Image: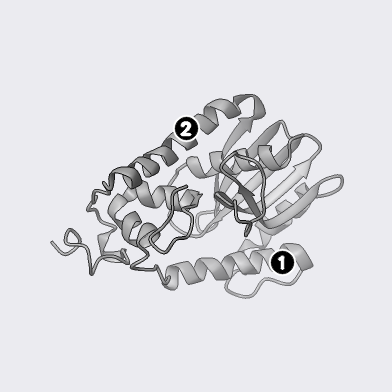
């Protein structure tokens, strides 16, 4: 079992895998040694407010505040999709253990976590939507992982349509995944996690200096960010 410096078990998510791939050295400082912590900024706080507003609107019908009223049409479209016999889940926390078996978010064997902004289940198919409040940058790995979580937690599901909903631009990018392809899809995700494991075993977490360095929480202790 791979553990962090503080003795906690190393767990994974799309964001942590992406952090490693963007810069293994940041991953070491933040996820393994836990020397630094990303405290958020105005951009992330804005995203959190939007997520909360949309969730409240869809859960209780609460009017959207002025900051997010422009997204009312998106909420109305989702309500159209969720007429019976569908089931709507918001901010759904799905977690798997290392055997890829569903487990609780806080259980001792929690290993791979995902939070789905919108999950709509209808018979043997599902729709997953991920709210995006930033610039339009595509990485379908996130949607791939969401679909794999759905297939594990809802074994009767055969097809998952996933979408990034770019709220600022009013755009949608979608990808559909079939249960019959899960072995190949898992092979990709697990290979990426294995690269993290190998870095841990070898102690090799190379820096990848980039335009992201000025916003890295480890910039003050990383010699590469200070060049």
Residue 205 at x, y percent in the picture: 27, 49
Residue 162 at x, y percent in the picture: 61, 41
Rendered residue at 20%/61% (across/down): 225
Residue 187 at x, y percent in the picture: 50, 30
Image quadrant in which you'd find residue 196: top left
Q: Nearer the viewer, residue 125 or 170?
A: 125
Q: How is the image coloured?
A: one colour
Residue 158 at x, y percent in the picture: 71, 30
Q: Is residue 163 left or right of residue 159?
A: left
Residue 136 seen in render: no
**Residue 123: mark in rendering:** none
Q: Nearer the viewer, residue 197 or 192?
A: 197
The Cα atoms of the two marked residues, 1 and 2, are separated by 36 Å
Q: Is residue 68 left or right of residue 81?
A: left
**Residue 57: mark in rendering:** 1
Image quadrant in which you'd find residue 102: top right
**Residue 188: mark in rendering:** 2
């Amino acid at each position: 079992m791979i553990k962090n410096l503080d003795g906690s078990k190393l767990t994974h998510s799309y964001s942590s895998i992406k952090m490693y791939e963007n810069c293994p050295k940041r991953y070491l400082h933040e996820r393994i040694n836990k020397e630094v912590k990303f405290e958020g900024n105005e951009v992330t706080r804005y995203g959190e407010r939007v997520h909360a507003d949309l969730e409240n609107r869809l859960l209780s019908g609460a009017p959207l505040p002025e900051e997010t009223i422009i997204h009312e049409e998106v909420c109305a479209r989702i309500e159209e999709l969720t007429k019976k016999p569908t089931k709507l889940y918001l901010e759904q926390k799905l977690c798997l253990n290392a055997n890829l078996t569903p487990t609780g978010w806080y259980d001792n064997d929690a290993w791979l976590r995902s939070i789905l902004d919108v999950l709509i289940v209808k018979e043997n198919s599902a729709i997953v939507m991920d709210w995006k409040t930033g610039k339009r940058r595509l990485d379908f790995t996130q949607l791939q992982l969401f679909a794999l979580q759905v297939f594990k937690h809802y074994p009767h599901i055969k097809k998952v349509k996933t979408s990034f909903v770019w709220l600022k631009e009013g755009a949608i990018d979608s990808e559909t995944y079939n249960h019959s392809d899960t072995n190949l899809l898992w092979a990709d995700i697990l290979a990426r996690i294995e690269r993290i494991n190998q870095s841990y075993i070898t102690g090799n977490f190379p820096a990848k200096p980039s335009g992201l360095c000025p916003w890295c929480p480890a910039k003050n202790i990383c010699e590469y960010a200070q060049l």
